[in-house]
Image (spheres, rainbow, N blue to C red):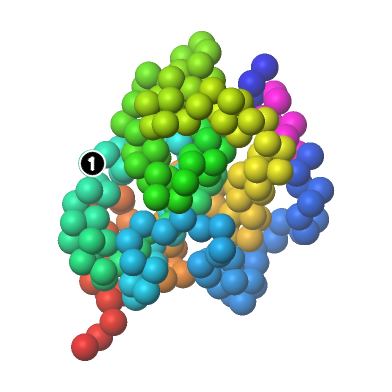
Amino acid sequence: MREIWFCLLIVLSLGTLSPTPALAAAGDAAKELAVQPSDRILGKAEAPITIIEYASLTCPHCAHFDVTVLPKLKEKWIDTGKAKLILRDYPLDEPALRAAMVARCAPADRFYPLIDTFFAQQEQWATSRDYRAALEKLVKLGGMSDKEFKACISDKKLEDQVAQSRLVASQQLGVDATPTFFINGKKFDGAPTVEAFDQALSGAAPKS
């Protein structure tokens, strides 16, 4: 039932986008890949390299990247001010949609810590028979009240925003899997390993 509901949400949301799903022109893609006011930035906003990640919070490959690869990239590239990361929503199912909404209801400085928690505990909540209760338990540890949680996951405007993020990425940028990365506007096609990112980020670094 969850899957049917989520597919219906995506289909209904299509009406708010351009009816032509053709690949976007270069200018349109560049516009979509520019930093947006709604983006949550990990790192320094002025960092010269921008990594945009489209991810689903129920995606095991996304969790692997966050738990295994990102800490090393953060130490070498993000904490040093060379690069910044922007995670954008590409929910694959209803639990991912709701979790993304909860993360965006949190204060900006709690967004990435909450994302890290969701990925680290993914097996505990994403496949739970009552994923909402499992999610609520996690966010309560982070200080979100029961009232705030219920208001957040019932927020239709936020729900549309998260669903729209996936649709725009799919239609305008050709994103069809998670995680998908763009580095300074160029799609990253390598394996999401520390070594592959090191090579790509070195190539994107400003020449001295």
Q: Which residue is drawn at 65% across and 43% down?
A: 158
Start-end of magenta stretch: 4-11
Q: Residue at x 56, y 63 (%)?
A: 37
Say if 25 sits above or below 101 in the image: below
Q: In which quarter of the image is the C terminus?
A: bottom left
Q: In this view, does 189 lie to the left or right of 152?
A: left
Of the pair 22 and 33, the residue shown nearer to us: 33
Neighbourhood count class around disc 1 (C-alpha, 10 Å): few under 14, some 14–19, many 20 upward: few
Measured from the top left, where is residue 173 in percent x and y? 58, 60
Q: Is residue 94 left or right of residue 49?
A: right
Q: Is mark 1 on a helix, strand or loop?
A: helix
Q: Does the magenta stretch include residue 126?
A: no
Q: Which residue is drawn at 60% across and 34% down?
A: 152
Q: Furthest-bottom residue in view?
A: 208
Q: In which quarter of the image is the N terminus?
A: top right
Measured from the top left, where is residue 4 in percent x and y? 69, 24
Dot 1 amino acid type: Thr
